[in-house]
Amino acid sequence: MTDLPAVFRSAYGAAPTGVWAAPGRVNLIGEHTDYNDGFVLPLAIPYTARAAARRRDDGVLRLHSEQGDGAVTELRVDELAPGTVTGWAQYPAGVVWALREAGHEVGGADFCFDSDVPVGAGLSSSAALECVVAAAYRDLYDLRLDAAELALLAQRAENAFAGVPCGVMDQMASTACAEGGALFLDTRDLSSRQVPLDLAGQGLRLLVIDTRVKHDLGDGAYAELRAGCERAAALLGLPALRDLDLAGLPAALDRLPAELRPLVRHVVTENLRVEQAVAHLDAGELAAIGPILTAGHASLRDDYRVSCPETDLAASAAVEAGALGARMTGGGFGGSVLALVEAEALPQVAAAVTTAFAQAGYATPRTFPVTPAAGARRLA
């Protein structure tokens, strides 16, 4: 990645106050449960959005990205409102807007960004960008905000400013994850704990398969799924689908319209899969979560219907080549697959998926292992 302080000086004619980083994430298990008050188990990955920043006291927000067109976007913080900013700049601008809406007396800043989190791959590139801005503003303006509060502000930016009705998992993973562990998060009250994930100690690896199929969660499909879940909960008289357990599932399904039943079945069984995975990790049985991942993918494919031919092929080819389990990770409609693989089988699994994609006429996937990394932090 680039020398951000040097880029900052070139763009703004002065040195930044500091440099911050916030990671992307993969979700081990627990997909589409976060906006249903459910359980999730993400981990941060060693790919980050970085920001060099300096406070301004004139109410001007200036934004430059190494992934952009080279131009500097200039905004006034007192004019920020949903719908006023488009493109990538809406994510950092939305965080500043969310801070001010929450009553924090923050003004402008200069930012230069760089990121190696793949965009559109289901690895939370937008959450990483939001969270690095939140972390920088916390320090630049001496705000007393913990990781959960930063995540909620970043989530509000994405929901209300960028128009994506996501849950809070991505932002919590980016702010609160710790190196060497996965974050067992209850999205109802944001209680969490770090669950040990010593992959190397058990001869295992997590392989990300970026299918290079891009998704846009703002296109309405994600919102429709969330609305369907909320409608189902209302029809069942529940605060959220989190409140329905496996024992009550059959009777509940009988009370619902046919189109809502698969959504409910996925959410209930997925919450159970998270709890099962955590129990195995707590017991040091990492290999045992493989079948849980594969079952999660089947549920996303058949019940929630957010998979696609490329993610289905990546998951099946990985398992056929020796992966202990594999599933789509992220919101769906493309993106990435996560496979749990024995270390010595990593090359053959990656090669098998690449070959399967070539035979199907798909674009060559990008494959890379990931290890649990730290959440948002100041680098300099």
Image: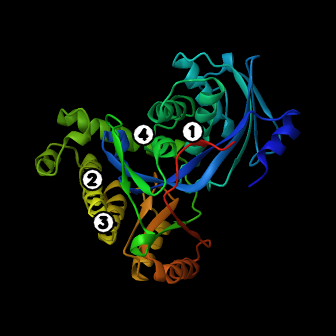
In the drawing, does residue 377 fall left or right of residue 300? right
Q: Say what amino acid the circle numbered 4 marks.
A: Gly
**Residue 272 percent across, percent down from the top left:** 24, 54
**Residue 11 percent across, percent down from the top left:** 85, 37
Q: Toward which corner of the image does residue 37 lie, by quadrant?
A: top left
**Residue 264 percent across, percent down from the top left:** 25, 48
For residue 284, which numbered disc appears in the image? 3
Picture residue at 48% right of the left edge, 36% below the top: 147
Q: Is residue 167 visible?
A: yes
Q: Say what amino acid the circle numbered 2 marks.
A: Pro
Q: Which residue is mark 4?
A: 167
Q: Looking at the figure, which quarter contains the N terminus?
A: bottom right
Of mark 2 and mark 1, the one earlier in the sequence is 1
Q: Looking at the figure, which quarter contains the C terminus?
A: top right
For residue 11, which numbered disc appears in the image? none
SS under mark 3: loop
Picture residue at 10% right of the left edge, 47% below the top: 251
For residue 262, which numbered disc appears in the image? 2
| Mark 2 vs mark 3, CA separation in Å | 32 Å
Between circles 3 and 4, the one closer to the viewer is 3
Q: Toward which corner of the image does residue 189 lie, by quadrant?
A: top left
